[in-house]
Image: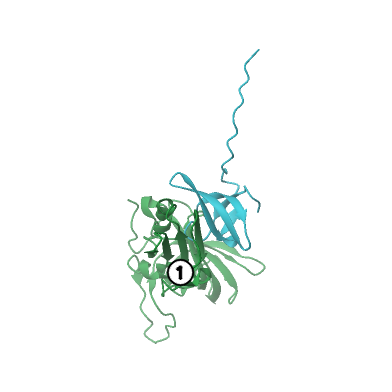
Chain colours: A green, B cyan
Protein backbone atom coordinates (compact mmCIF):
# COMPACT_ATOMS: atom_id res chain seq x y z
CA UNK A 1 0.00 0.00 0.00
CA UNK A 2 1.22 3.48 -0.80
CA UNK A 3 2.41 5.71 2.01
CA UNK A 4 -0.40 8.03 3.08
CA UNK A 5 1.37 9.33 6.13
CA UNK A 6 1.79 13.02 6.66
CA UNK A 7 -0.73 15.72 7.32
CA UNK A 8 -2.51 15.79 3.99
CA UNK A 9 -6.17 14.89 3.65
CA UNK A 10 -6.77 13.48 0.18
CA UNK A 11 -10.01 13.11 -1.75
CA UNK A 12 -10.71 11.47 -5.10
CA UNK A 13 -13.56 10.56 -7.37
CA UNK A 14 -14.16 6.89 -6.58
CA UNK A 15 -12.73 5.53 -9.85
CA UNK A 16 -9.61 7.65 -9.45
CA UNK A 17 -8.88 6.63 -5.88
CA UNK A 18 -6.10 4.14 -5.10
CA UNK A 19 -7.19 0.59 -5.96
CA UNK A 20 -6.54 -0.58 -2.39
CA UNK A 21 -9.14 1.96 -1.21
CA UNK A 22 -11.64 0.99 -3.89
CA UNK A 23 -11.37 -2.61 -2.75
CA UNK A 24 -12.51 -1.56 0.73
CA UNK A 25 -15.86 -0.44 -0.71
CA UNK A 26 -16.93 -2.86 -3.44
CA UNK A 27 -20.24 -1.07 -4.08
CA UNK A 28 -18.62 2.21 -5.14
CA UNK A 29 -19.94 3.99 -8.22
CA UNK A 30 -18.79 6.66 -10.66
CA UNK A 31 -20.42 9.55 -8.79
CA UNK A 32 -19.01 8.52 -5.42
CA UNK A 33 -15.98 9.92 -3.66
CA UNK A 34 -13.24 8.47 -1.48
CA UNK A 35 -11.26 10.40 1.15
CA UNK A 36 -8.28 9.55 3.30
CA UNK A 37 -7.52 11.37 6.54
CA UNK A 38 -4.25 10.71 8.38
CA UNK A 39 -4.60 10.23 12.09
CA UNK A 40 -3.37 13.76 12.85
CA UNK A 41 -6.09 15.38 10.72
CA UNK A 42 -8.88 12.92 11.35
CA UNK A 43 -10.62 14.85 14.10
CA UNK A 44 -10.68 18.01 11.97
CA UNK A 45 -11.72 16.47 8.66
CA UNK A 46 -14.25 13.94 9.90
CA UNK A 47 -17.05 16.39 10.60
CA UNK A 48 -16.96 17.73 7.06
CA UNK A 49 -16.82 14.25 5.57
CA UNK A 50 -19.64 12.82 7.65
CA UNK A 51 -21.94 15.84 7.36
CA UNK A 52 -23.38 14.42 4.13
CA UNK A 53 -25.02 11.49 5.88
CA UNK A 54 -28.53 13.00 5.82
CA UNK A 55 -28.19 13.13 2.01
CA UNK A 56 -26.35 9.89 1.19
CA UNK A 57 -24.49 7.16 3.07
CA UNK A 58 -20.90 7.84 4.14
CA UNK A 59 -19.00 4.80 5.34
CA UNK A 60 -15.54 4.63 6.84
CA UNK A 61 -12.80 2.12 7.47
CA UNK A 62 -9.93 2.54 9.90
CA UNK A 63 -6.55 1.37 8.64
CA UNK A 64 -3.78 -0.24 10.66
CA UNK A 65 -2.05 3.13 11.18
CA UNK A 66 -5.35 4.54 12.57
CA UNK A 67 -5.84 6.75 9.54
CA UNK A 68 -9.31 6.49 8.04
CA UNK A 69 -10.67 5.97 4.54
CA UNK A 70 -14.16 7.33 3.85
CA UNK A 71 -16.55 6.47 1.05
CA UNK A 72 -19.35 8.86 0.10
CA UNK A 73 -22.04 7.01 -1.86
CA UNK A 74 -23.58 9.93 -3.73
CA UNK A 75 -25.22 7.52 -6.15
CA UNK A 76 -27.42 6.31 -3.29
CA UNK A 77 -28.88 9.78 -2.68
CA UNK A 78 -31.92 9.05 -4.84
CA UNK A 79 -32.69 5.92 -2.86
CA UNK A 80 -32.38 7.94 0.35
CA UNK A 81 -34.87 10.41 -1.07
CA UNK A 82 -37.55 7.75 -1.37
CA UNK A 83 -38.75 8.31 2.18
CA UNK A 84 -39.43 12.00 1.53
CA UNK A 85 -41.42 11.80 -1.71
CA UNK A 86 -44.34 9.95 -3.21
CA UNK A 87 -43.15 6.90 -5.15
CA UNK A 88 -44.00 6.92 -8.84
CA UNK A 89 -45.50 3.66 -10.02
CA UNK A 90 -44.68 2.01 -13.32
CA UNK A 91 -47.08 2.77 -16.16
CA UNK A 92 -49.86 0.20 -16.62
CA UNK A 93 -49.01 -0.22 -20.28
CA UNK A 94 -45.61 -1.49 -19.31
CA UNK A 95 -43.92 1.39 -21.05
CA UNK A 96 -41.96 2.39 -17.99
CA UNK A 97 -38.34 2.26 -19.02
CA UNK A 98 -36.79 3.85 -15.97
CA UNK A 99 -35.48 1.57 -13.28
CA UNK A 100 -34.75 2.00 -9.64
CA UNK A 101 -36.26 4.45 -7.19
CA UNK A 102 -38.33 7.32 -8.58
CA UNK A 103 -40.20 9.76 -6.41
CA UNK A 104 -42.59 12.60 -7.08
CA UNK A 105 -41.30 15.68 -5.34
CA UNK A 106 -41.33 19.35 -6.25
CA UNK A 107 -38.06 21.12 -5.61
CA UNK A 108 -37.01 24.50 -7.05
CA UNK A 109 -34.58 24.03 -9.91
CA UNK A 110 -32.70 25.89 -12.61
CA UNK A 111 -31.16 24.62 -15.81
CA UNK A 112 -28.70 25.51 -18.52
CA UNK A 113 -28.27 23.80 -21.86
CA UNK A 114 -24.72 23.36 -23.11
CA UNK A 115 -25.12 23.72 -26.84
CA UNK A 116 -25.45 27.14 -28.47
CA UNK A 117 -27.63 29.06 -28.15
CA UNK A 118 -27.54 28.28 -24.45
CA UNK A 119 -30.89 28.31 -22.75
CA UNK A 120 -31.25 29.10 -19.09
CA UNK A 121 -34.37 28.91 -17.01
CA UNK A 122 -35.92 28.12 -13.70
CA UNK A 123 -38.60 25.65 -12.78
CA UNK A 124 -39.18 22.80 -10.42
CA UNK A 125 -38.73 19.07 -10.39
CA UNK A 126 -41.68 16.82 -11.16
CA UNK A 127 -40.04 13.57 -10.18
CA UNK A 128 -36.54 12.35 -9.44
CA UNK A 129 -35.10 8.93 -10.08
CA UNK A 130 -31.76 7.21 -9.88
CA UNK A 131 -31.36 7.59 -13.62
CA UNK A 132 -33.06 10.85 -14.41
CA UNK A 133 -34.95 13.94 -13.33
CA UNK A 134 -38.16 15.23 -14.83
CA UNK A 135 -38.50 19.01 -14.42
CA UNK A 136 -40.52 21.94 -15.67
CA UNK A 137 -39.02 24.31 -18.22
CA UNK A 138 -39.85 27.83 -19.37
CA UNK A 139 -39.80 26.84 -23.02
CA UNK A 140 -39.38 23.84 -25.28
CA UNK A 141 -35.78 22.66 -24.97
CA UNK A 142 -33.97 20.77 -27.73
CA UNK A 143 -33.76 17.01 -27.22
CA UNK A 144 -30.54 14.98 -27.04
CA UNK A 145 -28.34 17.85 -25.94
CA UNK A 146 -26.22 18.11 -22.79
CA UNK A 147 -27.60 20.19 -19.96
CA UNK A 148 -26.89 21.01 -16.33
CA UNK A 149 -29.65 21.03 -13.77
CA UNK A 150 -29.37 22.43 -10.25
CA UNK A 151 -31.94 21.22 -7.75
CA UNK A 152 -32.53 22.61 -4.30
CA UNK A 153 -32.35 19.34 -2.38
CA UNK A 154 -35.34 18.74 -0.10
CA UNK A 155 -33.22 17.39 2.73
CA UNK A 156 -30.80 19.81 4.41
CA UNK A 157 -27.65 18.98 6.31
CA UNK A 158 -27.56 19.27 10.07
CA UNK A 159 -28.22 22.78 11.33
CA UNK A 160 -30.53 23.28 8.33
CA UNK A 161 -27.66 23.97 5.94
CA UNK A 162 -29.27 23.93 2.48
CA UNK A 163 -27.94 21.56 -0.15
CA UNK A 164 -28.00 21.71 -3.90
CA UNK A 165 -27.72 18.87 -6.41
CA UNK A 166 -25.87 19.56 -9.63
CA UNK A 167 -26.71 17.01 -12.29
CA UNK A 168 -25.14 16.91 -15.72
CA UNK A 169 -26.52 14.76 -18.49
CA UNK A 170 -28.54 14.57 -21.65
CA UNK A 171 -32.08 15.75 -22.23
CA UNK A 172 -33.71 12.53 -23.33
CA UNK A 173 -37.25 13.89 -23.37
CA UNK A 174 -38.49 17.40 -24.03
CA UNK A 175 -42.03 18.70 -24.22
CA UNK A 176 -43.52 22.19 -24.22
CA UNK A 177 -43.03 22.88 -20.52
CA UNK A 178 -41.04 19.95 -19.20
CA UNK A 179 -37.98 17.85 -19.91
CA UNK A 180 -36.18 14.79 -18.60
CA UNK A 181 -32.47 14.89 -17.85
CA UNK A 182 -30.70 11.55 -17.93
CA UNK A 183 -27.97 11.96 -15.33
CA UNK A 184 -24.39 11.16 -16.26
CA UNK A 185 -22.71 12.99 -13.38
CA UNK A 186 -24.02 14.33 -10.12
CA UNK A 187 -22.59 16.16 -7.17
CA UNK A 188 -23.89 17.78 -4.04
CA UNK A 189 -22.82 21.12 -2.68
CA UNK A 190 -23.80 23.60 -0.04
CA UNK A 191 -26.38 25.67 -1.80
CA UNK A 192 -25.04 28.64 -3.70
CA UNK A 193 -27.71 29.36 -6.20
CA UNK A 194 -30.14 31.87 -7.51
CA UNK A 195 -32.98 30.03 -5.84
CA UNK A 196 -34.82 32.00 -3.22
CA UNK A 197 -34.15 30.90 0.30
CA UNK A 198 -37.81 30.86 1.24
CA UNK A 199 -38.74 28.20 -1.28
CA UNK A 200 -39.46 24.79 0.21
CA UNK A 201 -40.45 21.54 -1.39
CA UNK A 202 -44.20 21.48 -1.57
CA UNK A 203 -44.79 17.78 -1.57
CA UNK A 204 -43.48 14.73 0.09
CA UNK A 205 -43.06 15.86 3.65
CA UNK A 206 -39.40 16.79 3.53
CA UNK A 207 -38.10 17.49 6.99
CA UNK A 208 -38.31 21.01 8.22
CA UNK A 209 -35.15 22.57 9.57
CA UNK A 210 -34.65 21.74 13.20
CA UNK B 1 -5.06 29.55 -10.70
CA UNK B 2 -2.05 30.56 -8.65
CA UNK B 3 -0.77 29.86 -5.18
CA UNK B 4 -2.47 31.94 -2.51
CA UNK B 5 -5.59 32.47 -4.60
CA UNK B 6 -8.96 32.15 -2.90
CA UNK B 7 -10.94 29.17 -4.13
CA UNK B 8 -14.26 27.48 -3.55
CA UNK B 9 -14.62 23.72 -3.61
CA UNK B 10 -17.41 22.76 -6.00
CA UNK B 11 -17.36 18.95 -5.89
CA UNK B 12 -16.58 16.16 -3.49
CA UNK B 13 -17.10 16.01 0.24
CA UNK B 14 -15.73 19.50 0.86
CA UNK B 15 -18.02 21.06 -1.74
CA UNK B 16 -19.23 24.46 -0.68
CA UNK B 17 -16.22 25.25 1.47
CA UNK B 18 -13.74 28.03 0.77
CA UNK B 19 -10.00 27.91 1.04
CA UNK B 20 -6.77 29.16 -0.43
CA UNK B 21 -4.65 27.44 -3.03
CA UNK B 22 -1.44 26.09 -1.52
CA UNK B 23 0.08 24.00 -4.28
CA UNK B 24 -0.69 23.09 -7.87
CA UNK B 25 0.25 19.55 -8.84
CA UNK B 26 -0.32 17.63 -12.04
CA UNK B 27 -4.14 17.41 -12.32
CA UNK B 28 -4.40 17.92 -8.55
CA UNK B 29 -4.24 20.82 -6.16
CA UNK B 30 -3.62 21.26 -2.46
CA UNK B 31 -5.80 23.80 -0.77
CA UNK B 32 -5.92 25.01 2.80
CA UNK B 33 -9.38 24.81 4.33
CA UNK B 34 -10.39 25.93 7.77
CA UNK B 35 -11.86 22.87 9.47
CA UNK B 36 -13.06 23.23 13.04
CA UNK B 37 -10.97 26.36 13.41
CA UNK B 38 -7.75 24.78 12.17
CA UNK B 39 -6.16 25.13 8.72
CA UNK B 40 -6.02 21.69 7.09
CA UNK B 41 -4.30 20.85 3.81
CA UNK B 42 -6.57 18.94 1.44
CA UNK B 43 -5.48 17.48 -1.89
CA UNK B 44 -8.11 17.04 -4.56
CA UNK B 45 -8.78 17.09 -8.28
CA UNK B 46 -8.05 20.42 -9.92
CA UNK B 47 -11.50 20.42 -11.50
CA UNK B 48 -13.12 20.39 -8.08
CA UNK B 49 -12.06 23.93 -7.20
CA UNK B 50 -12.91 27.26 -8.75
CA UNK B 51 -11.48 30.71 -8.10
CA UNK B 52 -13.62 32.58 -5.64
CA UNK B 53 -13.53 36.31 -5.10
CA UNK B 54 -15.93 35.93 -2.19
CA UNK B 55 -13.46 34.42 0.20
CA UNK B 56 -10.74 36.28 2.01
CA UNK B 57 -7.68 34.08 2.04
CA UNK B 58 -5.59 33.89 5.14
CA UNK B 59 -2.77 36.39 4.90
CA UNK B 60 0.61 35.77 6.46
CA UNK B 61 0.90 37.48 9.78
CA UNK B 62 3.09 40.55 9.41
CA UNK B 63 4.39 42.03 12.64
CA UNK B 64 2.99 45.44 13.23
CA UNK B 65 5.73 47.98 13.57
CA UNK B 66 4.93 50.64 16.05
CA UNK B 67 6.68 53.91 15.84
CA UNK B 68 7.06 56.01 18.87
CA UNK B 69 6.33 59.61 18.27
CA UNK B 70 9.39 61.77 18.61
Q: Tell me where residue A128 sits by quadrant.
A: bottom left
Give the vertical position of A43 relative to A176 (above or below): above
Give the vertical position of A184 relative to A54 (above or below): below
Say if residue A14 shows up in the picture. yes
**Disc 1 element:** helix
- Figure label count: 1
**Residue at the bottom extreme, as displayed:** A93
Asked whether, in this view, residue A154 is left or right of residue A191, the answer is: left
Q: Tell me where residue B70 sits by quadrant.
A: top right
Residue A112 in percent (x, y) is at: 58, 64
Toward the viewer: A12 or A5? Answer: A5
Tell me what residue is drawn at x 46 percent, y 61 percent. A36
- Residue at the disc numbered 1: A21
Toward the viewer: A120 or A97? Answer: A97
Say if residue A152 shows up in the picture. no
Tell me what residue is drawn at x 43 percent, y 52 percent. A40
Tell me what residue is drawn at x 46 percent, y 65 percent. A34
Residue A53 in percent (x, y) is at: 37, 61
**Residue at the top extreme, as displayed:** B70
Asked whether, in this view, residue A99 is left or right of residue A138, the answer is: left
Toward the viewer: B56 or A135? Answer: B56
Residue A44 in percent (x, y) is at: 42, 50
Q: Residues within 10 Å of mark 1 (few under 14, many from 20)?
A: some
Residue A52 in percent (x, y) is at: 40, 59
**Chain of the residue under label 1:** A
Amino acid sequence: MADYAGKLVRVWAFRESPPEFQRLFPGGGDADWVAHAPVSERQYAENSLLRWRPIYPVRSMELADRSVVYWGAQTEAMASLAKWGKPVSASPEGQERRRGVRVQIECPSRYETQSEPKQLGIGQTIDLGSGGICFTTESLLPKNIEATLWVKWPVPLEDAVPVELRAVGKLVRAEAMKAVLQMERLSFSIEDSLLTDGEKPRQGGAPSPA
Amino acid sequence: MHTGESVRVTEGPFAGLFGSLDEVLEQRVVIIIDLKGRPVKVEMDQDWVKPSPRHKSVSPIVPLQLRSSA
